Image (spheres, helix red, strand yellow):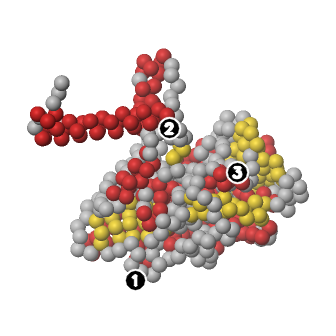
Amino acid sequence: MLRLKALPADEIRSLAFVAVFTTVLAAGGLLSLVHDKPAFSPLEKRRLAPVPALSAGAWASGRFTRGLSIHYADTFPFRDDLLGWHHRFDEWKGFRYDDMKVYFQAPGGSVAEDDDWDEDDEETGGAFNWGALAGGLVRHGTAARATSGERRLAQTTVKPDPRAADAQGKGTPGGGNPVVREVPPEDNRKVEKLQNVVVYGDAAFYIYGGSTKSADRYAAVLNKAASTLGARAKVYSLMVPTAVEYYLPAKYRSFSNSQRDLMRHVFGRLQSVTAVDVHQTLASHKDEYLYYRTDHHWTSLGAFYAYEEFARTLGYKANPLSAYQEIVIGKFWGTMYAATRSSALARHSDTVTAYKPAGRYTVKNFDSAGRPAGDGAIVLEAAKNMSDKFVAFITGDHPYIRIVNDGTPRRAKKLLVLKESFGNPFVPFLAPDFQEIHVADIRTFPYGLLDFVTSHGIHEVLIINNMFSVCDPDRIRNLKRIVEHE
């Protein structure tokens, strides 16, 4: 029998370490077999890998074992807690100057190569202005590496993810949410920058790096839509500014490109497309809760003010906000908290509030093949009890949603909305105004524009995208596919 007391002290310590380490691994493995497997991570705002299907082909190719390994890593016990501690540790790293914290880490890679785009494109709506940052560091006596390409170091990380939710209890009517305000330059609140996200106080923003080259492509697709439809339907363009346009402190304004300038650039190139300019409308309400602090989306209130401007552009009076039922869905931490795990954001949650229109409506969802996918809802109140609270708005992103007004619409018109996730909280405000609303997610809509407008008798087409999508080659390709669909 092994006599531990006869062993040297360092060997006893090694054996003890091995025993503890093996016990922890074994306990973790056993626990992973019996604990509930989550399907969605509130911390990372994504669906977790499921157990892969076992088949002879999957086993022989190694797909099954790889999938099983990914599933195990995704659903390991206390994974979100461990990730949270990891990101708290990460906050101790980095370099500070003035009131900004800079994380010198790979920005996520260069702009993805694509045969459809010129090699020197800068259409990265989420690109951080590294040249301006480097200049600021040099002015503060600190050397920083930068390339002549400046924005080419960062890629667009805002591939719009509508799934930003965290079930952390319910809010109160009226919000109780601290207003996000622009802070004067002398304010000393800490600023942190992670890849292309800036955390300022208790709010975070994606830095904007859109280029006129990509904006020209976006405008060209919209013009093609109008020329394709001709007199069949009128086309409207609504571009949604994001929070960085209004709330980034003045002394850091040079780090982000002007969304207003790019909007004007697009407006100046539109032909037979009517612009819905919401920039000044939102600016006049910037002291209100227009954007989430921890997420890249706008709130329902921001969408309402844009709806008012849309109605004015079409020549009719919008419904007042009081005409809708206010429904507090609950608290959540959004996509930018998931990207940064910032302790400043962790202390201040956001609240999702939806506005439900009066009246009776028939709502149907359809899949990417155009097949019926069940009944939908303009506002899904059951989202109060879901971790994914953004499904409250038209039940989330579906390839195609048809909303029929079963009462008397204010306008005897049929509207097609081409949108990404920013359109979701906007659509409910339109429901009382139209006979039918056809909502198309540009990423998965299965139909061509001309055939759809003709076969459904559409009178008006609204193309609504946030300013990152305006300069995102993927979103431009999505729209082009729909417009040029044969």
Locate residue 311: give its quadrant: bottom right
Disc 2 marks which residue? 35
Residue 147 pos. (x, y %): 29, 59
| Relative to 21, 304 lies left or right | right
- Tell me the crowding category of disc 3: few under 14, some 14 to 19, or many 20 or more residues within 10 angstroms, Cα based: few
Q: Nearer the viewer, mark 3 or mark 1?
A: 3
Residue at 89% over, 55% down: 407
Image quarter in which the C terminus is found: top right
Question: Which of the 4 image quarters holds residue 315?
Answer: bottom right
Residue for badge 1:
186
Say what secondary structure mark 2 lies in: loop
Residue at mark 2 to residue at mark 3: CA–CA distance: 26 Å
Q: Does residue 259 appear in this view? A: no
Q: Position of residue 32 (x, y in %)?
A: 45, 36
- Would residue 438 be found to the left or right of residue 169 on screen? right
Q: Residue at x 68, y 49 (%)?
A: 395
63 w.r.t. 44: above or below:
above
Mark 2 residue type: His
Give the Cα separation between the discs numbered 3 and 1.
44 Å
For the residues bearing labels 3 and 1, Cβ distance under 8 angstroms: no
Above or below, 186 relative to 320: below
Disc 3 is placed on an element classified as helix
Q: Give the residue type at disc 3.
A: Ala
Q: Earlier in the sequence, mark 3 or mark 1?
A: 1
Disc on the earlier residue, 1 or 2: 2
Q: Nearer the viewer, residue 282 or 373?
A: 373
Mark nearer the viewer, 1 or 2:
2
Mark sitting earlier along the chain (2/3):
2
